[in-house]
Amino acid sequence: MRVTVRLFARLKDLTGAGELIREIPEPATAHAVWNTLVAEWPALREYEKTMSVAVNAEYSRMMATVKDGDEIAFLPPVSGG
Amino acid sequence: MGVPAVAVTADPLDIEPLIALVGAAGDGAVVTFAGLVRDHNQGRQVRFLEYEAYEPLAVRALQRIVDEAKGLWPDARLAARHRIGRLEIGEASIVIAAASPHRADAFAACRYMIERVKQIVPIWKREHFDGGDVWLEGATADPDDEAARVKAYRTACA
């Protein structure tokens, strides 16, 4: 299946892309999507403990199941305001 | 409801429309907050800030905070705008207005909003300073983190 990955702030800088399309085998979790990214960019690994994940623009969890066409966003610690 | 209570925008922020948005004839208080870009941070001379948002979720998270505040201070009304893009020193990155029949609720709701924004709204600032730039990273965003929510509430009521 095909998912869209969104990356922000330093995660975007580390990969050089704010949006990526990835083919991953079903069934898959958000964590599986993350692992494909870490395999490509090992520097991402340091964010595993501090980032948040959103699926289709709603906060979710790394163990959440993702479906074909979903948008998975990985969010580094926020600094708005 | 025509004008939304919360928004993320690249346009300069103006507090007056927010005051009008939250106001009602029974109000005895309106409290406003503006977060500004300052010229120094952690010993660095700041040149400007660059804000980025995951916009659809940022709007939802802002609305979630308004809804949380409604549960805590049912008589208060809140509105907020967060700016994104390049912001110069002295410009407002966020404006919040809270109105209520009594000042205590308006102050508390306004403070709660900014504390929660810093906890759960997916917006990031990149600080451009003399000699480089860095993405600032604050809180791990988790809207279900009860301890964080309680901390914001206690700060709001301090």
Image (cartoon, helix red, strand yellow):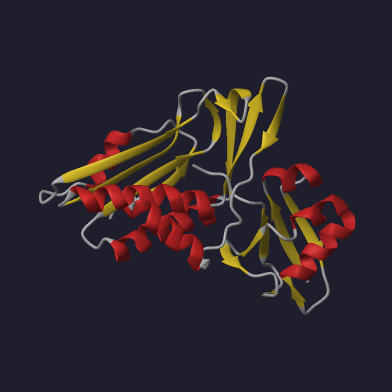
Residue A41 seen by the camera: no
Count of marks placed on residues: 0
- B122 relative to B64 in the view: left or right: right
Closest to the observer, B148 or A60: B148
Residue at (67% x, 44% y) in the render: A9
Residue B115's spot in the image, x, y percent?
44, 50
Query: Is residue B90 depicted above or below B96 in this figure?
Result: above
Q: Which quarter of the figure has residue A55?
A: bottom right
Spot occupied by residue B2 in the image (x, y as percentages of width and height): 29, 51
Residue lying at 79% horizontally and 54% vertically, measured from the top left: A46
Residue sticking out furthest to the bottom: A27
Q: Position of residue B5 (x, y in %)?
A: 34, 51
The quadrant of the picture occupied by the N terminus of chain B is bottom left
Residue B10 in sight from this viewpoint: yes
Q: Is residue B26 above or below residue B70?
A: above
Left or right: B26 as drawn, with respect to B109: left
Residue found at x 53% / y 66%: B145
Nearest to the observer: residue A67 or residue B117: B117
* x and y percentages locating residue B123 in the rendered image: 56, 46
Please, which residue is most extreme toward the front here?
B158
- Write down the quadrant of residue B48 in the picture: top right
Residue B3's place in the image compared with B71, above or below, is above
